[in-house]
Amino acid sequence: MNIGQKILELLKKEITEVEYNRYIKHLTYDTRKSSSDLAIFYVPNTLVLNWIKNKYTSKIEHLFELNNKAKVTVKITLKNFETKTTIKNEIEKKPTQHSLLNPSHTFDNFMVGGSNQFAYAAVKSVSEKAGEVYNPLFIYGGVGLGKTHLMQAAGNVFQNQGKVVIYTTVEQFLNDFIRHLRNKSMPLFQEKYRNCDVLLIDDIQFLSNKDSIQEEFFHTFEALKGAGKQIILTADKHPKKIGGLEERLQSRFEWGLVADIQPPELETKIAIIKSKCEINKVVLTNDIINYIATVIESNVREIEGILSKLHAYSQLIHVDINLEFTKNVLKDQLQENLANLTLDTITKSVSKDLNIKPSEIRSKGRSKNLVYARRIAIYLCRELTQNTMPQLAKYFGMKDHTAISHTLKKINELLENDEDFKVKIEELTNKITSSY
Ligand code: ADP
Ligand code: MG
C-alpha cells in the first residue's frame, strides 16, 4: 500500500461510509509525481473536483502531517491535467496575475427580476456609454447576488470593443502595489492602472482601514475619472456603511450612481435555475426546480453549487435526478453549511434571543436567567457543532468535560420534563439552522 492509499484508509475511518463511497473511493494517488512535501491525487470527473477539493483537502493534509510529521501540500486535480511543474509554480505563488474576465458572465446570461433590475439597468447603460453616464458606478449587495457577474458583463462588452479593461479584486490590487513597491517599479504600477480604459474593482469593502492603498487608489481614481475613463466598483454594503474609508474616497464613491442588488424573489430564482440548467446541460423537472428555489434562500452561488452537486452525484452513482434524490442532496448541503457554524455564532444567537450578553452566557454567573441561557447555548453548541466536551468546557469557562457532561445530563432531563424549555430549544434550533 503506498502512502497515499494509507492516508485515504485513515480518512475512511473519519468519514461516513456514504461519503467514502461517493467521493474518496474515486481518488487515486500519483506515486510518481508526488514527493515528500507534495501529494497529488486525481479525480475522474470535473464536476466533483471542486466539491472534493473544498471538503477534503485540509483533512487529507492534516492526516499527512500527522503521519509524516511534516507539512505536505495536497493537490487534488483532474487526471492528466496539471504537470508537476505547473503545480509547483502555483505553490510558489507567482507574481500577482489579474483574474481574467469570465466569458460566461454576460448580460444575456443574467436573469433580471425586481431584485436586481435597477443594478442591471445601470450597468447596462454604462456598458453602452463608457465614462459618460454614471462614473463611478457603485454596485452593492449581499454575497452571491450577481455583483461580480454584472460588473464582468460590462467588462466583456468593453473588451470586445478592444478597450483595455482591468478587472481586479482589492486583494490583487494590493498585492500588485506591494510587489511594485518592493521592486521599486511604482511608475509601472501607476502607468498600468491610470492608463486603462475601464477599471473594475471587486469587493471594495476590503479597502477599509488600509491607508496606503487607499491613498494610491485615490490617485488612480482621480486620474481615470479626470480622463473620462469608466470605473465600476462593487461592495457588500453602501459606501456610507463601509467604514474605515477616507472621507474623500467615500464621497467619490457616491459621485456617480450607487445601485443595490437585493436577494432574488422566487420567480427570479426559478428563472436563474432554468438558465443555469440550460447552460450546464442538466435536465430537471419543474417540481425539482421549484423545490430548490424555495429551499435556497438567496445566494445564487449556492444554487449553482446544488446543481453541480446534483449532476455530479447522479453521474457518479448512476441514478436519475428525482425529487427525493434532490432532497437528500440538499440535506447534505445543509449539513455542510452547519459544519461552518461556530460556537460564537450560536452563542450570539442565544444572546440575541434571550437578551443576555454573550460574555455573560460564557461567565460563571449563577443567576437563574444566566444558567438558563447557558444551558441552552451549551446544548445547541453540542448538537450543532463538532466540538468535543473539553472544547466546550474551555469555551464556556467550565472546569473540565465532566462539568459539561453534567450540564448536558441536566438539560436532557429538562427536555423530557419541561415543555417550555423544549419549545425554546426547538425554536432556537430552527432559527439558527434556517439562517444557515
Ligand atoms: P457576488 O459577486 O454578488 O457575490 P456573483 O456575481 O459571483 O455574486 O454571482 C454568483 C453566481 O451566481 C455567479 O456564478 C453568477 O453567474 C450567478 N448569478 C447571480 N445572479 C444571477 C442572475 N441574476 N442570473 C444568472 N446568474 C446569476
Ligand atoms: Mg463577487
Image (cartoon, rainbow, N blue to C red):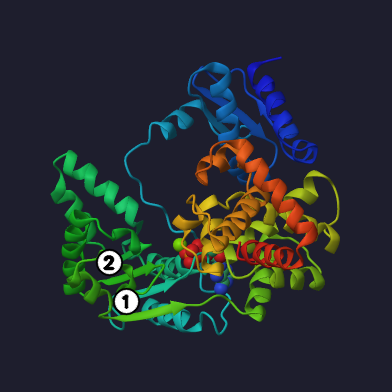
Q: Which residue type carries mark 1? A: Ala
Q: Residue 197's mark?
A: 2
Measuring from the top left, give residue 261's x and y in whole percent: 48, 76
Measuring from the top left, give residue 260's x and y in whole percent: 43, 78
Closest to the observer: 342 or 288?
Answer: 342
Which residue is pictured at 52% across the width and 47% down the height?
396
Which residue is pictured at 76% across the width and 49% down the height?
313
Quarter of the figure with the C terminus: bottom right
Measuring from the top left, give residue 392's x and y in whole percent: 57, 43
Q: In this view, does 173 lie to the left or right of 390?
A: left
Q: Does the residue labelled 1 lie within 8 Å of ligand 1?
A: no
Helix, strand or loop at label 1? It is loop
- The residue that mark 1 highlights is 130
Work out whether 45 lies above or below 33: below
Q: Quadrant of residue 203?
A: bottom left
Measuring from the top left, give residue 134's x and y in whole percent: 31, 81
Q: Quadrant of residue 388?
A: top right
Kindly indicate whether the residue at mark 2 contacts the one at mark 1 (C-beta within 8 angstroms).
yes
Compute the Cα span from label 1 to label 2.
9 Å
Q: Does the residue labelled 2 lie within 8 Å of ligand 2?
A: no
Which residue is pictured at 64% across the width and 46% down the height?
51
Quarter of the figure with the N terminus: top right
Q: Quadrant of residue 128?
A: bottom left
Q: Is residue 164 left or right of residue 270?
A: left
Work out whether 205 lies above or below 181: below
Total numbered circles: 2
- As drawn, the residue found furthest toward the top would be 1
Q: Which residue type carries mark 2? A: Asp
Which residue is pictured at 59% across the width and 26% down the height?
63
Q: Residues within 10 Å of mark 1 (few under 14, many from 20)?
A: some
Quadrant of the picture in which ligand 2 is shown:
bottom left
Q: In this view, does 319 lie to the left or right of 172?
A: right
